[in-house]
Amino acid sequence: MMNKRTKELKELYIIGAGGFGREVSDSVRDISRAAEARARHGAASGDGMGADYGAGAETVAAYRIAGFIDDDETKWGSLVNDIEVVGGIEWLRSRGASVGDSGDSSEGKPHAVIAIADPQTKRKVAEYLDGAVIWETIIHPTAIVSPYAKIGEGGILQPYAAVSSQVSIGKHIILNGYSGIGHDAVLGDFVSVMSKCDITGNTTIGDGVYLATSVAIIPDTTVGDGAFLGAGSVIMKDVERGATMIGNPARRVA
């Protein structure tokens, strides 16, 4: 049972029942366990539960996963990480639209997060569902986020991710485990940063950029919209819009 200091559980739908969706479901469960622990032991106990759980707060975030959403009909009704795949994108949209017809613009609408790494697919899903759902930002309890950083709606910060001071992050980003963003960096919407990436200070990354595992970007670098940075790439200079970069130092291959 949730302690009275804890918010009423938010029912959360995770869009994408693939590998990354399963990882996000683990993070959501960790968030809820951390929320319950803080509620039980007191928010001012200095337990280092992460940026989303401010000291002295009377309530903390907690979720119940209502189901996975996936357009693969063969998955419907099956269990993924003991969570049912309840339907597709259209099912979720219609559920939110029917609630919206009641008058209030947000009351009762489903809460959701997009657990899909491909930036283009994320954008299409977000644009289709905007207005029908409430986008949640998922921050794992072990993530470190500066109080002076800004993170847009629908973001996902996985275990041991780090966001430094004066960082600005757009909507629906992924910052996967052990990746870090240095001071004053700017990330656009729908950016996906895979594990162990190092985005150093004063870097600017455009919309829809994909950083594969272990990418490193030197300071004061700009990466254009829609670029793809291959695994292990070291970005030593500005990257053009839509470019595919690989290697150390990275070179353009497409």
Image (tube, rainbow, N blue to C red):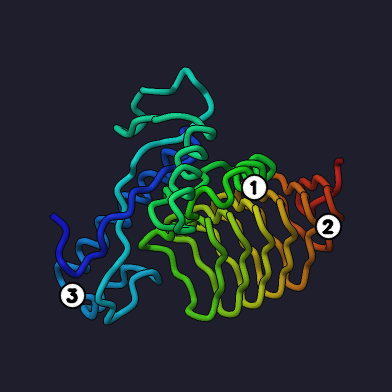
- Give the distance between the C-alpha atoms of the residues marked 2 and 1, in whole angstroms: 26 Å
Q: Is 246 above or below relative to 188?
A: above
**In terms of depth relative to the viewer, which is nearer, 220 or 41?**
41
Residue 80, given in percent of the width and then of the height, sits at 36, 30
Q: Give the residue drawn at x 83%, y 57%.
A: 239
Q: Give residue 127's mark.
A: 1
> In the displayed structure, does residue 235 sit left or right of residue 190?
right
Q: Is 115 above or below relative to 30?
A: above
- Mark 2 crowdedness (10 Å alpha carbons): few <14, some 14-19, many ≥20: many
Which mark lies nearer to you, 2 or 1?
1
Task: Residue under label 3, please give it.
Answer: 42
Which image quarter: residue 237? Answer: bottom right
- Give the distance between the C-alpha atoms of the residues marked 2 and 3, in whole angstroms: 47 Å
> In the displayed structure, does residue 247 sit left or right of residue 25?
right
First-in-chain label (2 vs 3): 3
> In the displayed structure, does residue 64 sit left or right of residue 154?
left
Task: Residue under label 2, please give it.
Answer: 239
Q: Give the residue drawn at x 44%, y 29%.
A: 87
Which mark lies nearer to you, 3 or 1?
1
First-in-chain label (3 vs 1): 3
Which mark lies nearer to you, 2 or 3?
3
Asked whether disc 3 touches disc 1, contact meaning CB atoms under 8 Å apart, the reply is no
Asked whether disc 2 touches disc 1, contact meaning CB atoms under 8 Å apart, the reply is no
Q: Quadrant of the N terminus?
A: bottom left
Q: Amino acid at mark 3?
A: Gly
- Mark 1 crowdedness (10 Å alpha carbons): few <14, some 14-19, many ≥20: few
**In terms of depth relative to the viewer, which is nearer, 8 or 48?**
8
First-in-chain label (2 vs 1): 1
